[in-house]
């Protein structure tokens, strides 16, 4: 009986089963990452102290914001436009698309390196960083910017090779854990942790491309579509999709990372440390959401590409129910165990982050409850709608932050994050219902893709 169940699980073509099967690969990586991150976060917080940890998170957050602004994320474009090529057996066209996205990502990384070089002296003056710390920040930034990881991620996901993707993702927390452990028993410092964080990005970059080159001959065409030639997207269509998905990603990163930087600049590094610790724990839930959302996007892209709108509607509503139930369970766990988690990871001096953890956790879980909304809009060719929802949420975040942060400090910033999450999710849900009723994306034929 167990063998039969496993056989059905591995061979089933049910859309939700396919999503869960691919999610299981990513969950294995995220599970490893979640466990190891508890240990290296504990080493980091205890080694640097509240203020030092806050300063470190301001640096990492600023690098990630710069990455989101200038280094385009290409994995969604590879999946969106590459899946129809693979379904039709057009390997050469898929390779050309992948190469194009590689150069887009790499050139954006070069631009980000230049921006960091210009901006670093101002940050050093604000926080009083020494020359070695400045050099470590620059080195960390260059590695992050020039490590082309989004394109191989898209290639592996388009090819339904989530196991390879999971392996590449798992490398980052493993390297960080080992590096943090070495620093803990030797001489922990801001510079040392930045070197370790940069090394983890570089190793993951190498592993990702190694996984891609392991199987360049992946072919899995649909039997009834082998004779149909899929034409490439128009330049306007490709650039519009790339623009809207990256702006949505930028808004998400700004919401997640820039607030920590703002708190650090206007309230202080210690406040930023408490805020980021709560945010880090809350965002472990968000990583669970990504485990499910990314395979969901790939599966929805496949269904839209072959014209199965009824199946895509069914998958959307089923996934929404699963994510809503999961979100409720996770929040109850956070409410009951949040203080113990903080004390275990970072010590009693960080317990002031518990109220922040509840608010930021609620914001994350609200986003988790609607995790299928944005992938649906992007797969249905309505990336513009997903972007508008994110932009409106960000505008509300900025306006409310200007009012709440000076008056209420970090707790005010946490309330603003929650309000913004509610607004964004409501708008995404309304747009998604419209997309399900009237799908815009036609079947992949000679005129659209």
Image (cartoon, grey):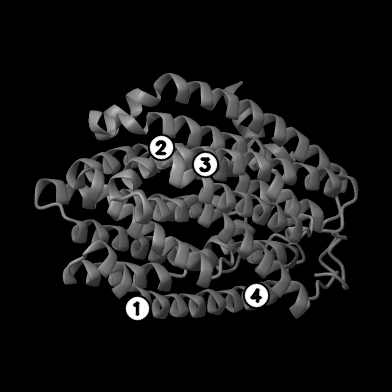
Labels 3 and 4: the sequence-earlier one: 4
Please state the horizontal and vertical placement of residue 28, each as a whole percent of the image: 46, 40
Q: Is residue 50 left or right of residue 412?
A: left
Q: Position of residue 265 (x, y in %)?
A: 36, 56
Query: What residue lies at 40% left-to-right and 77% top-to-bottom?
Result: 113
Q: Is residue 163 visible?
A: yes
The nearer-to-camera label among 1 and 2 is 1
Mark found first going from the N terminus, 4 or 1: 4
Label located before the other in sequence (3 or 1): 1
In what quadrant of the picture does the N terminus appear?
A: top right
Seen from the viewer's position, the closer of residues 98 and 334 is 334
- Name the residue that disc number 3 marks: 286
Badge nearest the viewer, 4 or 1: 1
SS state under label 2: helix
Residue depth check, mark 3 versus mark 1: number of the one nearer the observer: 1
In this rendering, the answer to whether 232 lies above or below 259 is below
Density class for disc 3 (Cα within 10 Å; few <14, some 14-19, many ≥20) is some
Is residue 10 shown to the viewer in this render?
A: no
Label annotation for residue 97? 4
| Frontmost residue, 167 versus 257 | 257
Vertical relation: 148 (above or below) 49: below
State whether residue 420 is above or below residue 306: above
Q: Position of residue 283 (x, y in %)?
A: 47, 41
Dot placed on the residue nearer the N-terminal end, 1 or 2: 1
Mark 3: secondary structure: helix
Which residue carries the number 2 mark?
Answer: 281
Closer-to-camera residue (59/404): 404
């Amino acid at each position: 009986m167990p063998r039969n169940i496993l056989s059905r699980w591995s061979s089933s073509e049910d859309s939700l089963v396919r999503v869960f099967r691919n999610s299981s690969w990513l969950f294995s990586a995220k599970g490893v990452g979640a466990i190891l991150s508890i240990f290296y976060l504990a080493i980091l917080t205890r080694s640097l102290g509240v203020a030092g940890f806050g300063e470190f998170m301001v640096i990492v957050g600023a690098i990630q914001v710069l990455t989101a602004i200038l280094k385009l994320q290409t994995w969604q474009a590879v999946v969106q436009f590459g899946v129809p090529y693979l379904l039709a057996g057009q390997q050469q066209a898929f390779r050309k698309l992948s190469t194009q996205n590689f150069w887009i990502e790499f050139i954006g990384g070069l631009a980000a390196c230049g921006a960091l070089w210009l901006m670093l002296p101002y940050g050093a003056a604000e926080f009083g960083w020494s020359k070695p710390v400045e050099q470590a920040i620059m080195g960390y930034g260059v590695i992050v910017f020039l490590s082309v990881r989004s394109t191989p991620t898209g290639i592996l996901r388009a090819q339904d090779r989530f196991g390879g993707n999971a392996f590449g993702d798992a490398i980052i927390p493993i390297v960080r854990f080992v590096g943090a452990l070495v620093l803990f028993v030797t001489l922990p410092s801001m510079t040392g942790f930045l070197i370790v964080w940069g090394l983890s990005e570089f190793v993951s970059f190498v592993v990702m491309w190694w996984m891609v080159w392991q199987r360049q001959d992946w072919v899995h065409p649909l039997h009834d579509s082998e004779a149909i030639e899929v034409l490439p997207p128009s330049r306007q269509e490709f650039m519009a999709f790339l623009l809207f998905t990256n702006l949505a990603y930028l808004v998400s990163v700004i919401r997640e990372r820039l607030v920590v930087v703002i708190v650090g600049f206007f309230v202080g590094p210690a406040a930023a440390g408490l805020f980021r610790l709560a945010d880090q724990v809350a965002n472990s839930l968000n990583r669970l959401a990504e485990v499910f959302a990314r395979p969901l996007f790939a599966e929805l892209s496949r269904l839209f590409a072959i014209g199965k709108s009824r199946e895509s509607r069914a998958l959307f509503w089923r996934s929404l129910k699963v994510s809503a139930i999961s979100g409720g369970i996770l929040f109850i766990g956070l409410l009951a165990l949040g203080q113990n988690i903080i004390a275990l990871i970072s010590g009693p001096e960080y317990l002031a982050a518990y109220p922040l953890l509840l608010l930021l956790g609620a914001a994350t879980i609200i986003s988790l409850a609607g995790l299928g909304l944005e992938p649906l809009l992007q797969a249905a060719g309505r990336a513009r709608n997903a972007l508008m929802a994110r932009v409106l949420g960000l505008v509300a975040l900025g306006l409310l932050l200007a009012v709440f942060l000076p008056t209420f400090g970090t707790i005010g910033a946490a309330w603003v994050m929650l309000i913004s999450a509610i607004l964004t999710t409501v708008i995404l849900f309304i747009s998604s219902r419209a997309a399900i009723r009237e799908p815009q994306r036609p079947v992949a034929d000679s005129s659209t893709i």
